[in-house]
Amino acid sequence: MNEILQYTVQGLAAGSFYALAALGLAVIFGVLGVVNFAHGACYMLGAVTSAVLLDLVGLNFWLALLVVPVLMFVFGVLLERLLVRHLIALDPLYNFLLTFGLSLLLVDLVKRRYGVSGLPYTRPEILSGVIDVGGVRLPTYQVFVFLFSLLVCALVWLVMTRTRVGMIVRASTEKADLTRALGVDVNRWVTPVFGFGIALAGLAGVLAAPFRAITADMGSSFIIILFAVVVIGGLGSIVGAVVAGFLVGLVEAFGQAYAPTLSQIVIFVLMAVVILIRPSGLFGREENA
Amino acid sequence: MSTKKLVATAAVSATALILSACGGGGPSAGGGDFTDDKVVLAVLNDQSGVYKDLSGPNSVEAVKMAVAYYQEKYGDDAVVDDIEVVSADHQNKPDIANTKAQELYDREKADIILDVPTSSAALAVATQAKEKKKLFVDIGAGTTELTNAQCNKYTFHWAYDTYQLANTTGTAITDAGDKNWEIIYPDYAFGQDMDKSFTEAIEKAGGTVGDHIATPFPNDNFTTFLTKAAADKPDVIGTMQAGGDLINLVKQFNEGGYAQEGIDLAVGLMFITDIHSLGVEAFQGVQFAEAWYWNFDDDNRAWADKFMDRTGTRPSFAHAANYSAALQYLEAVQAEGTDDADTIVGSLEGKKINDVFLKNGEVRAEDHRVIHDVYLAQVKTPDEVSEDWDYENILATIPAADAFMPLDQSTCEMG
């Protein structure tokens, strides 16, 4: 019984991290209709930037949590202004190809500069150690990631549902023409939303730096899991991404515990089952199916 | 196809045929018997993936260093003037390795293929070497199959293997008192082989292995695997992961606080590039098998300095072993005056070698396992490190005869 509890807690901790990482992907798709294949690469850039800034200017983890997402936001804004924007009117396939190409480029550039073995990163001392609650042991850092991810997900959800900005953004995606007719400049919001999505990917990268290998390839397999998360949750759905993130984390943890070699496949079995039952995902809208 | 196109295609094909016929055979400028008038050394390895830093492009540099050394040493007396070094990326996939090996032997006219990390890829190349009757010296892969059931006349295994790793690390750590093991290994040829070899070595030394936990490869979340391994309260968890996977696992092991519970971490296979990337702090005190260390003595250091001038980094044992294998191949070519594979095999078999990599080395004729002294190393603590890349204390030297699988255990039947 204790074992099951342990795996559940671990799965939820991993799940919160998946939820946060997938959130940006869901926001970008929801608002722009762009399937951002470069999300994994942006996650990697977040981690690499943290490690490089730590090495160069001694930027610690706490500051990185603030600074790196801001840098990634600027990077996202540039991407949207210079590239993505010009393809939005075309078939979504064009932006898919663009972001896929971008991810290859980013991975290769990092590989050329920093090699493949990865970069060192020091975890803040306060987040070391293990918290033991009634026999269930959880590394302090995982507890932090869990709480932090939950907080960010809640904030994003609040902004999207409870603020004027969030309402405009949602209205723009639902009925762009009508929103425009009401005097709202829809295009004004596209750029910051894309930048925000990229910033979230970067933030996930900063969180990953202390407990995952910081390598150019770290986003390549991660993006596959993220796509599984957003497909299970329903493309573009913020709540869906969060719920699916937790589901995937749990399925992975129990897979690792009881069918180790199949632990990566079970995620996709879950995805297949969800799509069979609800083609648009758990919280998806019909037109995105 | 139009007539014009047809004629053009025919003309190109004919020219190609004539050209290739011209290139085939003929005596060399140096007077020996050389196919294509040249010697071609091919490095087939991972040029872009997880094993790029530990070997990759810098192994190609190491082989070029061997060629430069050979040319400088023999000057006008060299039996062959034209020595080419080519390389290809097998992406750690056996099917790509198989195709690339064929291309290298047939199209690039490679006389020898070197390196080939990733056991499954190495076994594919060994099969090609056997079929094409061309040399293959493996450095990067660990499987003992290369010199056991799947051994062949044209394949040599130069640097290390899973038996040697297990009989260095597994034995030493069990002898030192860590009797109860759990093993976590990646579920492919290398990991399975490592699990088997370590279990045998540990049991021989009087230890036991509880769970053998197979993990997907590659993988970046090892949290639950570690929890599962630690649940039985072992003395030590042995990880057989390599490259980026190893770094993921070590980070998550440190984070899980298992060391504070008294569980040690033993690493089955580690390269100095792994320590460099994660930093000594994360690995401090970890014991592992080392086939060669750049700062072991003056000779090694002198070579490592030259390597650093060319690459900007210190060499891993794989870099040094690629240099050694290329150099000994060229020495054999020089001695025999030919690049004929059968002659070179004969020249290498049974040869005793001491060079910058091989200490008390011997190319075993019976199974083509190259045996040499290896070391039990320990990662230094941060305050012991006096310069960049100076990360290892050499705890013990395991003599060549003890380090590798004894011949009476080998299942090799050289065809």
Image (cartoon, rainbow, N blue to C red):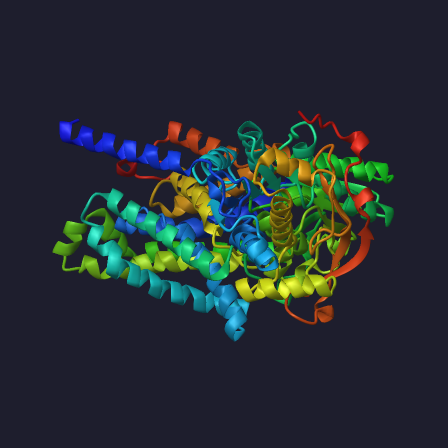
Residue closer to the observer: B284 or A267: B284
For this orientation, the residue located farthest to the bottom is A57
**Viewer-nearest residue: B180 or B266:** B266
Please provide percent x and percent y for residue B90. Answer: 49, 41
Q: Does residue B130 appear in the picture of this structure?
A: yes
* Residue at 42% from the left image edge and 30% from the top image edge: A272
Closer to us: A96 or A154: A96
Say left or right for A204 vs B381. Answer: left
Compared to B369, does B379 lie above or below? below
The image quadrant that residue A273 belongs to is top left
Question: In the image, is A227 to the left or to the right of A190?
Answer: right
Residue A163 appears in view: no
Q: Position of residue B241 (x, y in %)?
A: 63, 45
The C terminus of chain A is located in which quarter? top left
**Percent coordinates x, y for residue B336 in the rendering:** 63, 42
Above or below for B313 versus B153:
below
Q: Left or right? Give the position of A159 relative to A215.
A: left
User: Considering the image in quadrants, where does the N terminus of chain A appear?
Assistant: top right
Q: Residue most toward the left?
A: A181
- Number of marks in picture: 0
Q: Position of residue B185 (x, y in %)?
A: 66, 39
Q: Nearer the viewer, residue A224 or A14?
A: A224
